[in-house]
Amino acid sequence: MFFNLFKRNRDVFLGLDIGTECVKVLFFQKKNEKKEGNVAGDKIKILAFAVEYFDKYGSSEKKELKSILKKTISDVVENAKKKIIFSDFDSELKNKIQKNKFDVLLTISADNFRARVILLDFERENLNSKISEKEEKNICKKIITEVKTKVAFDFSKNMGVLPEEINWTSLKIISKKIDGYSVPCFSGYEGKKIEVKALAVFLPKDYLKKIGAVIKGIGGRIMLLHEAETLPEIFYNKNKDSLFIDIGGDISQFFIIENGVLEEINEIKIGSKDFTEIIAKDLGIDEISARIFKEKYSKNALSESAGKKTKEMFFSEKKKWLSELKNKLKELRKKDVSCFDIYLFGGGSALLEFKDVLEEEIRENCEKMSISSSSEIKFVFPETLDFAEGILEQDKKNLQMTPLLLICNNLTR
């Protein structure tokens, strides 16, 4: 069912994002346009977007997780289909979607679906000769083996999953150096020290099997993708080192891009759901009501007094989130947050506590060093992604849509 490459005989696709709090879907078409110089350039046209929360189905009643997941996915796909059926799109397109004649681009929350950048370096044995094609193949084979070993060890230690229980959805070299110089390939070059960065994308086989069973029959073929696979290409021309943070329900995943190269991927186990739980506990209300209250707060739709009280309620948690992020960056021997331009996306980032606490940190750091800050904090709204067309007015700043658009960008390359 799962595959790595599209034959691209379809022009209609479904983006499916299974998160910890909700499921998001995005129907879209792949378009081919002519750029300057008669060069072909692909874009995507948005057809429909829909979101469905798990809590609507009574997860608190301890129903079987699989049945809740299946019901949620089925309902959100049908809701998106209805939007298309009642639109002015042509009948041929509507017919394709009704008959499930579309392929699926799937992504899953970082609870189970992870990506890592691995740095490896070693010395060649044959120092006085150019690297042959055979030696390059052996180098690449060695790299993949070492990446699998290193990632499997860390993942097994932290997640309790044995190496043989890991499914690798992508393993590729993203940068190559010989004696400190970047090279497009190894063959034909001389040198002693080989340095590479590799991107590994993986998840437990058992979880992949469960997801496959749940979404079977929704469409045609399924491609499992991680936003790390396209994020660097979309933002390649950013001049300053960048920190991208995807804030989900249970986890905030971050990506560091320096000089156009993906340098680091990691996560902290705090997300927007932690703030929902604070509201539920402090106000004595159920989870659904707490989530709705949080969304109103994010939109500044509460009274002045209620907004002020909620802000105070969130103070400790936002500081905890920042502390976790700083500690993780320190652990990875990376710069402080004030050294980056920061880009926020994902549904959780709509809660302004995350942006506020980052701004406070940057301001305090600059005051300590008596310097002015050149760092920017921005949201990656759907409307800022130039490869996507047809985004409805109400979704142009919908941060829940952004992760889906990032994986859909795979079809524009």
Image (spheres, helix red, strand yellow):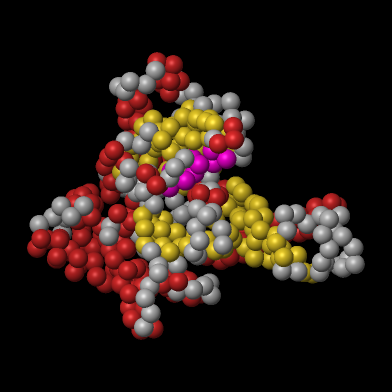
Image quadrant in which the C terminus is located: top right
**Closer to us: 231 or 142:** 231
Residue appearing at x 46%, y 54% in the figure: 110
Q: Is residue 121 left or right of residue 343?
A: right
**Percent from the top left, x then y, of residue 409?**
50, 42
Q: Residue, x 90% and y 63% (percent of image)?
A: 129
**Residue placed furthest toward the front:** 37
When asked about the image quadrant of residue 263, the answer is bottom right
Q: Can residue 293 be seen in this view?
A: no
Question: Residue 148, position in %: x, y?
Answer: 66, 58
Count of picture labels: 0
- Does residue 319 lie above or below 104 as drawn? below
Q: Is residue 407 magenta?
A: yes
Residue 227 or 201: which is nearer the viewer?
A: 227
The stretch of residues the image draws in magenta is 403-413
Q: In this view, does 325 lie above or below 133?
A: below
Residue 162 % position (x, y):
60, 58
Side of 33 where 357 appears, left or right: left
> Magenta stretch: dominant SS?
helix
Q: In this view, does 298 lie above or below 320?
A: above
- The answer to whether 287 is drawn above or below residue 39 in the figure is below
Which image quarter holds the N terminus? top right
- Which of the 4 image quarters holds residue 247? bottom left
